[in-house]
Image (cartoon, rainbow, N blue to C red):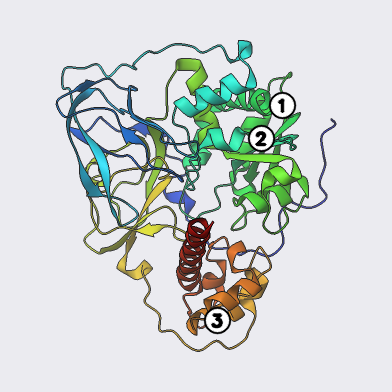
């Protein structure tokens, strides 16, 4: 296939343009965080069913050893992020705000922390199913934040096919730079991962989608593409939420994913660049998902950094390595400012889906008074999936949740673009999250009722 040329910068319709604030960590190479004295590994770090611990208190585990097995197809196993002794299995604070079961491991101070069973895995001699199974065993999930099990995404439903694979390196959230640094520092692992994905999917071509504010990374990747790898770098407009799957597909391939459908319905599979690089390292070194690159940033942290952090490391250990927080720090988010989750405790662990930790000072945490909707329609112009957030917000305010289904509330990506542009400071995305949660609970109750009657 010949290279495609664009007369305009590729993008999707609508969206917003927040300041990106990426200068804080853009030029900071990835550093390896020293192994902490202990880690807390939640058994639920992915969409789907939690894993099941298979270790016991007092047991010695090696870095990379399986400590939690998947409990279903949509589930993902857990591995020890460092060698040491299992202290206990206990309920612990989770970044979601809940208390969840977690395996606590105390580091062995005498261990060299070498990888358990390190080896090269020859994916070229494996079938597509064997490759996907190996990825599943490695515990890989989407590292962009959704944490959807990778082996599930690579399992193509009967009757469908994947012609194209897109590496999501848009990283449209302000402040975050982990994907950008991976492009610059783990190029060969990314290319190895792409080769693995193409064989596992039976896809004919790959695309690396990144934004124009990462032009140097796009150029670096483009210059390094092996001559035998059917891959192309697409440099897109810097716009939020460019990294959402449906928006990315529209920008890169000019294909629209219909309402209620998935990318595979338009013959596309999308995965985050961090996941792709991790899969490459799985087959290069036999390393499962036990660590990840995290951007530690914001005006509230004394020394911003891009860190390679063992999964399960407490936030307090990360803060200590970065010289502490400012006295006027008022909010800590896991993720970026648009879709991040606020944290109450410093002992919450870094998760598989933690792409960044953002520390905001008092002047950045603006408490605005809410006013009535003025029907300006800015939210309509911003919504990337063509919803009417103004109408949906009014229905949510009146608790007419079932009526929201007629306005396609379940298509909402919760990107917060509508809240960002609202001059009346209406917390639209928060209302939508509540409404969607209640509607899902209601649907689950109805499904259980139907099962009981049948």
115 shown above or below 352: above
Q: Position of residue 179 (x, y in %)?
A: 51, 40
Write down the residue under mark 2: 156
Give the label on residue 160, or none. Answer: none
396 shown above or below 110: below
Label 1 packing within 10 angstroms: few (<14), some (14-19), many (20+): some
Q: Which residue is at a point 48% across and 40% down the rendered structure image? A: 143
- Tally of numbered tags: 3
Give residue 311's quadrant in the image.
top left
Write down the residue under mark 3: 395
How far separated are the C-alphas under marks 2 and 1?
Answer: 10 Å
The answer to whether residue 318 of the structure is visible from this angle is: no
Q: Position of residue 180 (x, y in %)?
A: 52, 40
Mark closest to the chain's N terminus, 2 or 3? 2
Q: Position of residue 281 (x, y in %)?
A: 49, 22
Q: Position of residue 11 (x, y in %)?
A: 71, 54
Q: Quadrant of the N terminus?
A: top right
148 shown above or below 114: below
- Taking depth in this image into account, of 446 and 351 the one nearest to the observer is 446
Q: Is residue 244 left or right of residue 370?
A: right
Check disc 1 and report its element: helix, strand or loop.
Answer: loop
Mark closest to the chain's N terminus, 1 or 3? 1
């Amino acid at each position: 296939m010949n290279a495609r040329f664009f007369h305009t910068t590729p993008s999707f319709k609508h969206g917003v343009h927040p300041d990106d604030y990426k200068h804080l960590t853009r030029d900071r190479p990835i550093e390896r965080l020293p192994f902490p004295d202990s880690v807390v590994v939640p058994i639920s770090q992915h969409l789907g069913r939690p894993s099941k611990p298979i270790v016991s208190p007092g047991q010695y585990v090696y870095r990379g050893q399986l400590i939690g097995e998947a409990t279903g197809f949509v589930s993902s196993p857990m591995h020890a992020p460092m060698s040491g002794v299992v202290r206990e299995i206990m309920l612990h604070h989770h970044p979601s705000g809940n208390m969840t079961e977690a395996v606590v491991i105390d580091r062995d101070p005498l261990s060299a922390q070498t990888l358990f069973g390190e080896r090269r895995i020859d994916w070229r001699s494996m079938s597509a199913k064997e490759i996907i199974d190996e990825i599943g065993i490695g515990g890989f999930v989407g590292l962009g934040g959704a944490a959807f099990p990778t082996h599930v995404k690579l399992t193509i439903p009967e009757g469908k096919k994947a012609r194209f694979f897109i590496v999501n390196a848009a990283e449209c959230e302000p402040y975050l730079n982990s994907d950008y640094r991976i492009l610059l520092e783990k190029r060969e692992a990314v290319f190895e991962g792409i080769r693995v994905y193409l064989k596992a999917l039976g896809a004919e071509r790959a695309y690396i989608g990144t934004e124009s504010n990462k032009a140097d990374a796009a150029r670096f990747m483009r210059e390094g593409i092996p001559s035998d790898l059917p891959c192309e770098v697409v440099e897109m407009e810097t716009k939020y939420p460019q990294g959402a799957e449906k928006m990315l597909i529209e920008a890169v391939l000019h294909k629209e994913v219909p309402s209620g459908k998935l990318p595979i319905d338009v013959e596309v599979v999308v995965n985050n660049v961090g996941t792709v690089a991790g899969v490459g390292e799985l087959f290069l070194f036999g390393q499962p998902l036990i660590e990840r690159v995290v951007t530690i940033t914001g005006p509230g942290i004394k020394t911003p950094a891009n860190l390679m952090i063992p999964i399960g490391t407490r936030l307090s250990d990360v803060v200590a390595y970065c010289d502490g927080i400012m006295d006027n720090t008022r909010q800590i988010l896991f993720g970026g400012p648009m879709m991040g989750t606020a944290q109450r405790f410093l002992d919450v662990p870094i998760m598989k889906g933690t792409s960044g930790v953002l520390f905001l000072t008092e002047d950045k945490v603006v408490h605005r008074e809410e006013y009535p909707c003025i029907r300006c329609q800015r939210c309509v112009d911003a919504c990337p999936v063509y919803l009417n957030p103004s109408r949906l917000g009014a229905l949510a305010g009146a608790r007419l949740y079932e009526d929201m289904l007629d306005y396609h509330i379940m298509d909402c990506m919760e990107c917060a673009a509508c809240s960002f542009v609202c001059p009346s400071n209406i917390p639209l995305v928060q209302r939508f999250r509540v409404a969607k949660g209640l509607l899902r609970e209601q649907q689950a109750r109805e499904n259980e009722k139907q099962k009981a009657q049948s």
